[in-house]
Image (cartoon, rainbow, N blue to C red):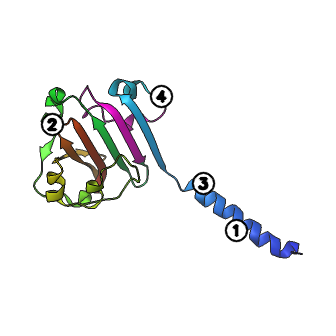
Amino acid sequence: MISAKCLLPIIIVGLSSIIVVGCGNNRTEWFYASLSDAQKAQDGPRSWVRDDLLPASSRNIHIDGELSPSREWCAFEFAPADSDSLRRKLQPIVMLPPPVQRVRSPDMDWWPVVLKGNLDVDKIHKVGFELYVVEEPANSVNTFILLFAIDWQKGRGFFFETYRSD
């Protein structure tokens, strides 16, 4: 028989484990059939949907976000004829900026293997993606860095968003 004196530490450790595990998940995931569905959605913060960057024809939008540190993974499809607005906003890259040289896997089956871990630009190009970057101020001390991998012919794209401290 376990005494009350021995049982108390077991209960404390057990409850602490439950609290740590329960509070440890700061990730969210959403799926939208279309950009208009994403814009109308009430299930998450609007800041996760980058409708300022995605083409109007975007569909099958998968978003996985992490609050701390701030990261976002997004997959989307679009009509290739509707790519002009996206093309105008993206800057082609030759060399990956340091914050996106290594991309942590979101552990989602929709995220391409070639965009996980230490990125190899040649391998990414060989599977049909062109790489682009968007940089925009996050606040007075940080800049958001978005790495886009786009297959223009197939009308599909992915982006990983993180930040750089200035």
The residue tagged 4 is: 42
Quick check: can you spot residue 96?
no
Q: Nearer the viewer, mark 1 or mark 2?
A: 2
Q: Nearer the viewer, mark 3 or mark 2?
A: 2
Give coordinates of residue 138: x percent, y percent: 30, 46
The residue tagged 3 is: 22
Q: Secondary structure at mark 2?
A: loop
Disc nearer the start of the sequence (4/1): 1
The amino acid type of the residue labelled 2 equals Gln
Disc nearer the start of the sequence (3/2): 3
The residue tagged 2 is: 153
Q: Quadrant of the N terminus?
A: bottom right
Q: Quadrant of the C terminus?
A: bottom left
- Compared across the picture, whether 71 is left or right of 19 comes to left
The residue tagged 1 is: 13
Say if mark 1 contacts mark 2, CB within 8 Å. Answer: no
Say if mark 1 contacts mark 3, CB within 8 Å. Answer: no
Give coordinates of residue 163: x percent, y percent: 30, 53
The amino acid type of the residue labelled 1 equals Val
Within 10 angstroms of label 2, few (less than 14), some, or many (20 or more) residues? few
Q: Residue at x 30, y 37 (%)?
A: 76
Let me know if residue 151 is in the magenta part. no
C-alpha gap between disc 3 and disc 2:
43 Å
Q: As rendered, which of 113 and 100 lies closer to the eye?
A: 113
Give coordinates of residue 116: x percent, y percent: 30, 57
Q: Secondary structure at mark 4?
A: loop
The amino acid type of the residue labelled 4 equals Gln
Q: Secondary structure at mark 3?
A: helix
Q: Secondary structure at mark 1?
A: helix
Q: Is residue 105 above or below residue 38?
A: below
Disc nearer the start of the sequence (4/3): 3
